[in-house]
Image (cartoon, helix red, strand yellow):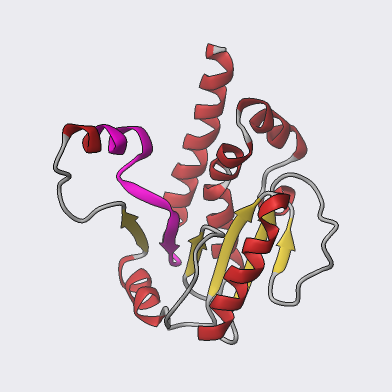
Amino acid sequence: MSGPLTTISLVSTDFLPYAGVLAESVHEHHSGARVLIVLVDGTSDHPPEASFELLTPAQIGCDDCELAMRALAYETQALTSSLKALALAAALKRAQGPALLLDADILVCADLTPVLENVERHTILLSPHSNRPLPTSAGEETFLRSGVYNGGFVGAAPGAEAFCAWWTRASPEAVSATLLAA
């Protein structure tokens, strides 16, 4: 694996404690890891954490105007999700190898080296919600609504920039369509 692990997560202020637990769990298995946390809804009154670097949306490429537009279109959780592509691209730029986008409610319980080796080998790693067909059509409808892949665990290696750019372009189009339909 080239360089230390870099992870990135996006949280609202009320989820900041989750980010601390995520960071501690990452460091437990990767002591030299760089854990980046994007605070999507303002500033925090919490003292700075030694276990992670706190970033603003502007630091991942979402200026105040774009953030305001997304905040009008989305509630906090969806706002956070709408910034994931920018966050992954920003982490990849800061990384010395692959980067992982992890939801803040993830707890790392083992060494991620095998995952990172797969990210390096395949450039992009997506995690499916299920690895077998669902028994009912209701399950298929759920996938159609929320997606086949889990956006809370995505890996990218150098060479995935085009994927990140596509994902980034797709997010604002969805925001614009939402605003125009309202």
Res. 124 image quadrant = bottom left
Q: Residue at x 64, y 53 (%)?
A: 11
Highlighted magenta segment, given as a residue range: 141-158
* Residue 69 position within the rendered picture, expressed as x and y whole percent measured from the top left: 68, 28
Inspect the magenta stretch and tell me whether residue 66 lies in it.
Answer: no
**Would you say 74 lies left or right of 2 here?**
right
Res. 166 image quadrant = top left
Residue 30 visible, this angle: no
Inspect the magenta stretch and tell me whether residue 144 lies in it.
Answer: yes
Q: Residue at x 69, y 76 (%)?
A: 51
Residue 80 visible, this angle: yes
* Residue 114 position within the rendered picture, expressed as x and y whole percent measured from the top left: 34, 79
* Residue 134 position within the rendered picture, expressed as x and y whole percent measured from the top left: 17, 44
**Would you say 95 lies left or right of 42 here?**
left
* Vertical order, 31 against 91 (above or below): below
Outermost bottom residue: 31
> Which quadrant, please, contains the N terminus?
bottom left
> Which quadrant, please, contains the C terminus?
top right
Q: Residue at x 36, y 74 (%)?
A: 115
* Vertical order, 31 against 150 (above or below): below
